[in-house]
Structures are given as structure tokens and as C-alpha cells.
Image (cartoon, helix red, strand yellow):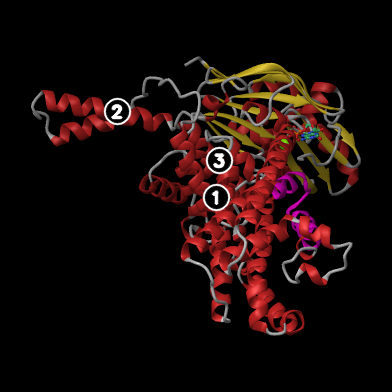
Amino acid sequence: MTAEAIYAEGLVKRFGETTALAGVDLSVPTGSVLGLLGPNGAGKTTAVRILSTLIAPDAGRARVAGHDVVRDAHRVRQVIGLTGQYASVDEKLTGLENLFLIGRLLGKSRADARSRARSLLTRFRLDDAATRATKTYSGGMRRRLDLAASLVGQPRILYLDEPTTGLDPRARLELWALIRELVDSGTTVLLTTQYLDEADALADDIAVIDHGRVIASGSPEALKARVGSRTLVVRPENPAHLDAVAAVVTELAGAAPEVEGGRVSAAAVGTDVLPAVVRRLDRDGIAVSELVLRGASLDDVFLALTGQPTVPTETDDEP
Amino acid sequence: MNPERGTDSGANAVRAGGASSDGGARSDADRSNAARADETAAPPAPELPARVPLAAALQQTLALAWRSLVQIRHNPWELGDYSIQPVLFLVLFLYVFGGAVAGSTDDYLAFMLPGMIVMNMLFVTVYVGHGLNTDLTRGFFDRLRALPIARWSPLAGRITADLVKQAWSIVLLLGLGIILGFRVGTSPLHVLAMFALLLAFALSFSWITVLIGVIARDPEHVQLFGFTALFPVTFVSNVFVPVETMPAWLQPLVNANPVSILSDAARGLLVGGAVLQPALWSLAWALALTAVFAPLSVFALRRRLSG
Ligand SMILES: Nc1ncnc2c1ncn2[C@@H]1O[C@H](COP(=O)(O)OP(=O)(O)O)[C@@H](O)[C@H]1O
Ligand SMILES: [Mg+2]
């Protein structure tokens, strides 16, 4: 096959008046993970739907595993797995039946489909719920089943559209671990997300998308270097200590912090700064009411890349 | 289908050939080692099929039909919709109207049961559109479309499952009717012909509910829309009341209604009387409905999926 598992050039898609994609280029080397990062309404789902043959682009072209997504859609479908933005399992079937059905649709024998379903349920810790209708599942369980469903055919290329949106932190970390396992076994992944930390945690490369355009791309490190990875925020209990705190932060973070609203904040600091600041403030006897090291948010990324915070376009999309 | 499976079985075939040519010299352990090595080694890229073979598409249709039927196991109330509801209708109409319309419940049963079966068949078709709309709005249809399956199998699977539900509710109503005193006045062959005719009509009528299923915003609207449209159509027919008792201006409408024609055919096949003419007209209606609504539905579905 080609070295590029996914290759897209100039993808354009309009929905009536809305231009969902305004010329998107993407390239995902085989075996790597691309994080498509962007706010709500940026065009992430539209891109995934084109790359998974669900809709045709108005202009541009895309190849997946060397097959054109429009002209050779059936071949593309044989190598991909899709986990859409909204868990799409049959709510009236059990977890086992959902996976069994997909195995059967992929041409497996009854026995093979059943054993594949069972092993996926075990791997995704859904054994106990295997014979319950999925409408009784929690959000996290449904997400896991959805992911399992897209793995029944052992796809070489996997699309994950906002896999952790709406999940609690524990379920989110669990899903991250599962995704990492897949990547380790050689699956190429295109992952969309609204969270910089998620792209950072999972992706080899990130493409930042906004208003249907890729506005920046590169490794997470390169992107964070442009953004400033972390912000240190310190709020002294006594506002009279603001200057003293600012001096400490200047010394330890190596740059002049911003002092505003009773808080001192310094961008782009390393992880070692926080404990150093804690020790110094403790030694100097300065009490603080707030002390955090905040990871860069999507807003920070947008602020750095476009000079504007993310503009919430329309709230929700899906037809 | 699955590329991995394809290469696996290919590799197995080659191995089997090798083993026989060297006279089975290789031990079982060797062979299973070889099998393991084959599983881990990246298989040479196989040429993937460009389209779905017909046999595979039929198997996919059956798998999807199985899915629609097995849903009932976890949602018993759904079974109630095509079991309890028609039974209630039959019993209520029979004992409340029987005396007034036909003089006795026995005579009324002979007149009304075939029409009742027709009416119930039409109502059951609404579930085709309802189920399709559920899949479209809840995203399951997209999951199916991203799989390497025939484009028509999800719809064909639904309709196949519907035929099973149809057959079930016909058997149910006929069985209950017989318990309540209905006597089949024809032959088993006629009864089979009635099944075939009704299922053929159900098949064509499903296209209307498919269209509703594609257009409607959510499953509740499909039901509302479907049942609201079906009530007048089935009541302005000869299902419950002989047409002669209706006002003269209404009679042409009732006689032209395909529900009346199909009910006449069902009466002929179950009780006795004219069969050929109403049966042929019913089939003509079925063909006409399919010719109009199948292309419309497919067109509407394509449109909905492209946006
Ligand atoms: N089927 C559709 N019909 C009309 N507009 C749509 C449709 N799908 C997406 N859009 C619009 O296209 C834009 C991009 O949507 P989407 O790709 O879903 O963004 P994201 O997944 O990044 O949130 C949005 O403005 C959305 O409202
Ligand atoms: Mg989206």
C-alpha cells in the first residue's frame, strides 16, 4: 500500500449556505495518529464523514489506503472502522448482539462472529453487560461498545469522532488507554477532538481546523511551543503580597508574569516551576488561596494562532 | 469480505497443499507454528473486491432481518403492537358492532375477519418506516453505511423482517377468528394464496411508509403520520361495513379504495366467492404503488443521506 493511509486534497463541502469545509488538505502516514483539533462547528465531523464514504465532497479528493473515497468507496469501507460522534449502536439489541450482527455483516460465520464479539466485550470490560439491551448502558459503556463495534473487522484505519466528549474524567482516561493499545498494534487513527490535552496525549500530529480550514498543523510539541504549554496562576490570600509573589514567579519562571484581578499568571512555564514556587512561598510565609498549573486550552491555541478566542458558531449541528 | 479473513483462508489452502505434497512429513506442531507465524506476519496486500457479491448481499439482508426481529425480544411491548392491538380490535368490533351490522356475530365474523386481516397488515407496515427513521435519526444507519455491505441490504433486511411480522399477525388473527367461530369455506391452497397476496401487497405498501420514514423528523412523527393517514383509508372501505349500507356519494370512493378490493379478494380466498377479479386488481394496485413510491423513496433517501 501507499505510505499515506489517509490523503486528502482540497476537500470542500457545502450544506446550503454553510460552507462546512473550505478546502482541507490532510495527510496521515500509515501507523500514525492524526488529531483533528477544532471547536464545535469547525468541520471535523464533515471531514470524517467524507473520509468514511458517508458523504461525497463537492470538490477535492481523498484516498484512503490508496482507494478513492468516491469512486472506490466499497474498497475503502473494507479497511476502515468508524466511531461516530454520537454512539451509534442499536439500542434495542444487547452488546453481544450488536457485535455479533456486525461480524455477520462482515461475512463471518456464526461461530466466528460470536467469539469475536465475546473477546471484544472482554477487552472493553463489557462482559457483565453483554446480555443487556444497550439502552440500559451508561455513556461510557456505550462509547466503549461503539468503539468495539468499529473494531469487529480489525480495520487498518480507524476514525474516532470526538470519542471522549461528554465522558467523565475516569471514562475518558479509560478510553485513551484503549486507543493507545490500538495504536500500538499498528492501527492508523484519525481522531477529532475539541481538547488540546486529548490531541496532545494521543496524536503524533495535530491539524487545527477552524471554519472549514486547517489553520495550523504539526507535532503537538511544535504546536505547544507556539502556544505556550502551561500557565501558572497564583493568588495570594493577602493582596498586599501580590508584588512579592510576582517577584518570586519572575525569578523562578524566568519571565515577567501578568498581574491582574488579584492574581499573578505566567505563561509557558515548565512543570518543575510549580513545586519550586510552592517551596519558596512556604519559606517566605506567603499564604495563597489559589495555585494552579493550567494546561493550554483550545482557547489558548486559538488565541495564539489567530489572535482571537474560539468563536462559538452554531451550538449543535448534526442533521 | 474481510481482507484478513480472505488472506487467512488463502494461506491455509497453500499450507494444506504443501503438507500433502511432502507426504505429511511436517508435524502438527510445525503446522500450528506456521499458522501462528502467518497470523503475525503482515499479509501481502490482497486485491480487495470492488463490489459486494450477490450471495453476500443476501446474507447481509438476512442478518439485518434477524436484527429487526431480535429487537422484539428486548422490547416485548412491540410484540403487543402487532398482537394485542389487532386482537383487541377484532374482539371489540365483533361483539359491539356484530349484531347491528350483520344481525349476528357469526355472520359478522365471516364478513369482517378478512378485512380486519387486511387492515392490520397495513398498520404493521408502518413499523418499516418507523424502524428506518429510528436508524436514520439515531445514527445507526451511518454505522451500517460505513460497512462494506450492499447499499440496499439495510432496507431489504427491514422489509424481510416485516414480512415475518406480517405472517405472524395474519396467523394470529386467523387463529383467533377460528377460535371465535370463523369457518374457512375454501381450500388450504386458497388460504396460502391469501397469504401470498397480502404479503405481496404489504411489500408494495411498505414503500409508502419507507418514504414517510425518510421524510419524517423523528420516529414519533412516523407513527403519527402513518396512523393518521391509515385510519381514514381503512375506514372508508368495506372492511367493517358492506358498501351497500353507505350513502350513494360515498360508494364509488369505497369501491375504488384498494383496501376494499384487497378485502374482497381476501374474503373470496377465505370464505368463498369472486376471487380472480379483486385479486388481479389488488396486484395491479401493488405494482402501481411500487412503481410510484419505490423510486420516490430511494430518491428521498439519497437526498437525506447526502446532506
Ligand atoms: N447535514 C448538515 N446540514 C446542514 N449543515 C450542516 C450539516 N452537517 C454539518 N453542517 C454544518 O457544517 C458546519 C461544520 O459542521 P461539523 O462538520 O459537524 O463540525 P464539527 O464536527 O467540527 O463540530 C457547521 O456549521 C454545521 O452546522
Ligand atoms: Mg462534530
Q: CA distance from mark 2 to mark 1?
A: 40 Å
- Report if the beta carbon of the residue with label 1 is closer than 8 angstroms to ligand 1: no
Q: CA distance from mark 2 to mark 3?
A: 33 Å
Q: Name the chain letter of the residue that bears numbered label 2.
A: B
Q: Chain of mark 3?
A: B
Dot placed on the residue nearer the N-terminal end, 3 or 1: 3
Q: Amino acid at mark 3?
A: Ser
Q: Is mark 2 within 8 Å of ligand 2?
A: no
Q: Secondary structure at mark 3?
A: helix
Name the residue at 75% across, 80% down.
B97
Is label 3 in contact with label 1 (beta carbons under 8 Å)? no
Residue matched to label 1: B160
Residue A157 percent across, percent down from the top left: 53, 29
Magenta region, residue range: B208-232
Q: Secondary structure at mark 2?
A: helix
Of B269 and B288, nearer the camera is B269
Residue visible at 80% across and 24% down in the picture: A304
